[in-house]
Image: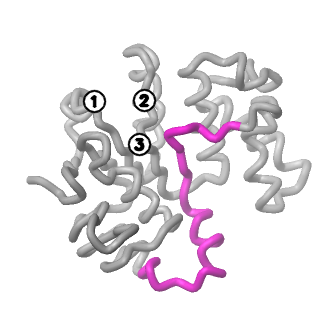
């Protein structure tokens, strides 16, 4: 489903963030991208999600090279993705319901359809009872679950998660991992960046390790 070949990304001519990165992910597979801070994990996720373009190489998704797509086509492509950002990007002046509903409003869903889909998403992450709460009143784990609900509201085929368990205690970390595993079990392709190697060891799933922008085997 996803095949990256010889991906190179730099923001100047001397220091590439990623160097000749190649890997593949099958439809419905779960992949961890691991490595230390600054290894290029976030950049790689942004390239897969078509938020940035590589300087060299190709990324084939569903038989289409997204690095060569016209910019006008990218918003339609991105509807296939659910994005969980490391910095959360929650709207602190909107309640939980409105944070999750926003992608549906942007996509033009009817006002009768939105409440049903929002509550279904909140139910999947265990936040139905918090729909009128403001994000600032939520715990760290609840805020991360809110981000997941927003990411899956459009029922994406691919879920990209950038350090979703960072700064969470062990109990919340397990909760988030189990939620991601649940989506993977129903066929969602999950790609997660993390520096926590203990998560990877406990999961026994496909993993690529980045160091200084290159895959280390």
Asked whether, in this view, residue 23 is left or right of residue 42, the answer is left
C-beta proximity under 8 Å, tags 2 and 1: yes
Q: CA distance from mark 2 to mark 1?
A: 10 Å
Q: Which residue, given by chain and number where applicable, does mark 1 sit on?
A: 199
Q: Is residue 99 above or below residue 60?
A: above
C-beta proximity under 8 Å, tags 2 and 3: no
Name the residue located 63 percent from the left edge and 38 percent from the top edge. Answer: 149
Q: Residues within 10 Å of mark 1 (few under 14, many from 20)?
A: some
Residue 155 x, y percent position in the rendering = 61, 52
Q: CA distance from mark 2 to mark 3?
A: 19 Å
Q: Which residues are magenta?
A: 64-90
Q: Earlier in the sequence, mark 2 or mark 1?
A: 2
Name the residue located 40 percent from the left edge and 37 percent from the top edge. Answer: 181
Q: Is residue 24 visible?
A: no
Decide whether residue 62 is among the magenta residues.
no
Q: Is residue 142 above or below residue 14?
A: above
Q: Is residue 79 visible?
A: yes
Q: Which residue, given by chain and number where applicable, does mark 3 sit on?
A: 185
Residue 47 x, y percent position in the rendering = 43, 65
Q: Which residue, given by chain and number where applicable, does mark 2 sit on?
A: 165
Decide whether residue 70 is among the magenta residues.
yes
Residue reaching furthest left? 217
Q: Quadrant of the N terminus?
A: bottom left
Asked whether, in this view, residue 205 is left or right of residue 216, the answer is right
Q: Which one is in front, 115 or 130?
A: 130
Q: Residues within 10 Å of mark 3 (few under 14, many from 20)?
A: some
Residue 25 x, y percent position in the rendering = 30, 61
């Amino acid at each position: 489903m996803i095949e990256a070949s010889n991906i190179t990304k730099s923001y100047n001519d001397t220091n590439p963030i990623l160097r000749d990165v190649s890997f593949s992910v099958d439809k419905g597979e779960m992949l961890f991208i691991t490595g230390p801070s600054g290894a290029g994990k976030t950049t790689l996720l942004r390239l897969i999600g078509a938020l940035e373009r590589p300087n060299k190489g190709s990324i084939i998704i569903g038989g289409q090279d997204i690095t060569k797509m016209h910019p006008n086509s990218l918003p339609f492509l991105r509807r296939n993705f659910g994005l969980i950002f490391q910095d959360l990007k929650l709207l602190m002046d909107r309640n939980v319901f409105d944070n999750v509903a926003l992608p549906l409003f942007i996509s033009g869903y009817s006002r009768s359809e939105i409440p049903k889909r929002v509550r279904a998403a909140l139910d999947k992450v265990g936040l139905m009872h918090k729909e009128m709460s403001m994000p600032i009143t939520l715990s760290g784990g609840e805020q991360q679950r809110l981000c997941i609900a927003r990411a899956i509201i459009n029922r994406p085929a691919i879920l990209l998660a950038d350090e979703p368990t960072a700064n969470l205690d062990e109990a919340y970390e397990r909760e988030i991992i189990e939620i991601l595993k649940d989506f993977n079990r129903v066929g969602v392709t999950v790609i997660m960046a993390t520096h926590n190697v203990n998560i990877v060891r406990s999961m026994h799933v496909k993993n690529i390790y980045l160091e200084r922008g290159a895959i280390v085997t």
